[in-house]
Amino acid sequence: MGHVYRQRAYNTVSKKPTTSATDYSDDMFDENILAVNRLPHESCQDVLEPHHLLLVWESASENSCPGGGAHCMACSLRCPRRSSVTENSMQIVIHAKCHDSCVCGHVVCPGVAVKPTCVSKRAVESLNTYLRPRRIIIVTTSAEACTVFVTFAKNVQCVEEGSILPGVSKETVGEYLEARYKSVDENSEFHGRLLAGWYLQQFLKLGAAEYMPVEPELSQYFLVWDLDMMLLRPLSLFYIPGASRKVHHVQRQTVVNVGGNKLPGYEPSYKRLTGQDLEYAPDGTSFVTHWLVVYKPYMAEFLISIGGGNFTDNPANALHLQMGEASTRWVWRILDSIDPKFVETGFSEYASYVSWVKQNYPESQHVLKRRTWRRNPLGGKLAIIAGMYFRSDGLCCPMEWAVRLMRFFNYQYVGFEIGHYHVCGYTDERHDKGYGV
């Protein structure tokens, strides 16, 4: 047996955390991560709905627990008094890119997006429906784009990408790529995105833990979410092994999803950065699943580790060789590690971070057994471009029937990568400031 829900309470005298949990089997967890329709304790079925098995929070409120502590304790849940609760818990970050009536949480969803779109708007709506984060932090290209993003929801906070990583921008990344790989054009397009921008958005996700200029700062755990992915039902971010019931200390594991594409360019860069082979899921797929729970101490150690290695003797590295470990040296190490044959897809932030944690702190992860999502809706390209024929504006925005179909087949989230289809006109000049919003 394993636990997929955990609530951390705090003793009002000792201030030390105490944890209790509800049990769910591994099979139930992997098959349908959190949309659970039955509970092991029948006495709690009138207290906890399926969406109550959503997140692990480190704070809770007596006022938000239906039925009060007596009913919750039958399910090994507790609702501490408001005075005993810590302020911080989990947060989510989005490069533009919690809900629970029995607990209150501090979740921040950071994500990265070039410009506001009808897809990113639906993604924000879905996060607020199924995760209900306190904050959604969207990183984007300009103040003008931010003025649109903040209208998506009251809990959206927007940050311009140029204010995050010192010395790292689309321009500096592009200049380095052209100097390091002579045949590369920094403005070349691949699947509708500029090469320099594609690498920059990965660096922004990795660097958010240390450099994100927001108050309050990101919590120890936060969720990175790609804003072209739409949640269809509640999502589990943490897992508590069944053996933890027998001890006072509960080891929290971050859930790692599976089912990502395998691209050959990811392997050589990771090998050069770490000396290890890139990890893959038990089913042979990759960990590029478009969301990631980050633990700040692990991320800091990971970046220091890869930033501390040696550069090649390529002349493009002359400046960056002088940079110290406390800087963004890891950015240039990553770019220097790319295999010249795979510059267009030479590194994955998701696969690399998950692989490094798996190799250094394997007990901290719970890897799912099967995929619970799709990169594109059923119907593929036809479902993506359907809006061109059925919408008055003729744009490739998500059709409600496509979303409902994915939910009907019990998928947990689905992508609408409109930038990958040239026919959608995502990069047309008329959509420079936004697409479908």
Image: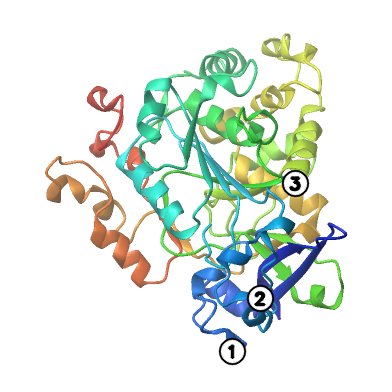
- Residue at horizontal 67 percent and vertical 59 percent from the top: 82
Secondary structure, mark 3, is: helix
Q: Which mark sits nearer the N-terminus, 1 or 3?
A: 1
Q: How is the image coloured?
A: rainbow
Marks 3/2 in contact by CB < 8 Å: the verdict is no
- Residue at horizontal 55 percent and vertical 29 percent from the top: 199
Q: Which residue is mark 3?
A: 356
* Classed neighbour count for the residue bearing mark 2: other residues with Cα under 10 Å, few (<14), some (14–19), many (≥20): some
User: Can the viewer see residue 375?
Assistant: no
Q: Which residue is mark 2?
A: 69
Q: Which mark sits nearer the N-terminus, 3 or 2?
A: 2
Position of the C terminus, as image quadrant, is top left
Disc number placed over residue 43 in the picture, else none: 1
Q: Amino acid at mark 1?
A: Ser
Position of the N terminus, as image quadrant, is bottom right
Secondary structure, mark 1, is: helix
Query: Which image quadrant is residue 272 in?
Result: top right
Marks 1/3 in contact by CB < 8 Å: the verdict is no
